[in-house]
Amino acid sequence: MHYAVLKTGGKQYKVEEGQIIAVEKIESDQEKIEFDNILLLVSDGKIKVGKPMLKAKVLGQILEQAKGEKIKVFKYKAK
């Protein structure tokens, strides 16, 4: 079993080969992207843990850029 834990957009994601994930918006006009903030890598039962990051890369592909549902923020100030 091969998987990695990567960090992007202030969040951490456990990813496997061929998996589709939704991440925060990535400012890129290219279709291919590489993630270099790898925290953990498991390959053939061998576990590599970064302190804090590993010198490894995970390659990905941007399928679509989508906007989420609009949110409303209210601030209340007690008088």
Image (cartoon, rainbow, N blue to C red):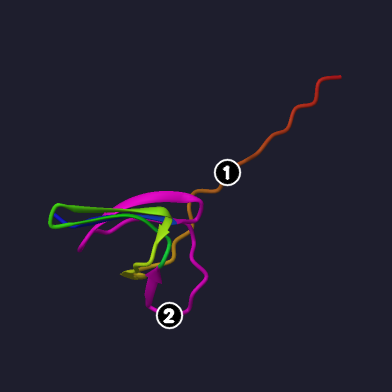
Which quadrant holds residue 61? Answer: bottom left
Q: Which mark is residue 30?
A: 2
Q: Residue at x 48, y 66 (%)?
A: 26
- Quarter of the figure that contains the C terminus: top right
The numbered mark at residue 2 is none
Q: Magenta stretch: residue 1 in it?
A: no
Q: Nearer the viewer, residue 21 or 70?
A: 21
Q: So how many labels did they put on this image?
A: 2
Report x, y in % for residue 48: 28, 55
Nearest-to-viewer mark from 1 and 2: 2
Residue at position x 14%, y 52% from top? Answer: 45
Q: Amino acid at mark 2?
A: Gln
Which sits in the foreground, 72 or 26? Answer: 26
Of all residues shown, which one is farthest toward the right?
79
How busy is the neighbourhood of tag 1: few (under 14 within 10 Å), some, or many (20 plus)? few
Work out whether 2 lies above or below 61: above
Q: Nearer the viewer, residue 48 or 1?
A: 48
Determine which residue is flagged by label 1: 71
The quarter of the displayed image where residue 44 is located? bottom left
The one nearer the camera, 65 or 27, is: 27
Image x and y of residue 78, in percent = 81, 20
Q: Vertically, is 2 above or below 28?
A: above
What residue type is disc 1 on? Ile
Asked whether, in this view, residue 73 is left or right of residue 28, the answer is right
75 sits left or right of 4 in the view: right
Residue 33 lies in magenta, yes or no?
A: yes
Q: Position of residue 70 (x, y in %)?
A: 55, 48
Q: Which residues are magenta?
A: 8-35
Q: Residue furthest bottom?
A: 30
Residue at position x 27%, y 59% in the image = 20
Residue 66 lies in quadrant: bottom left
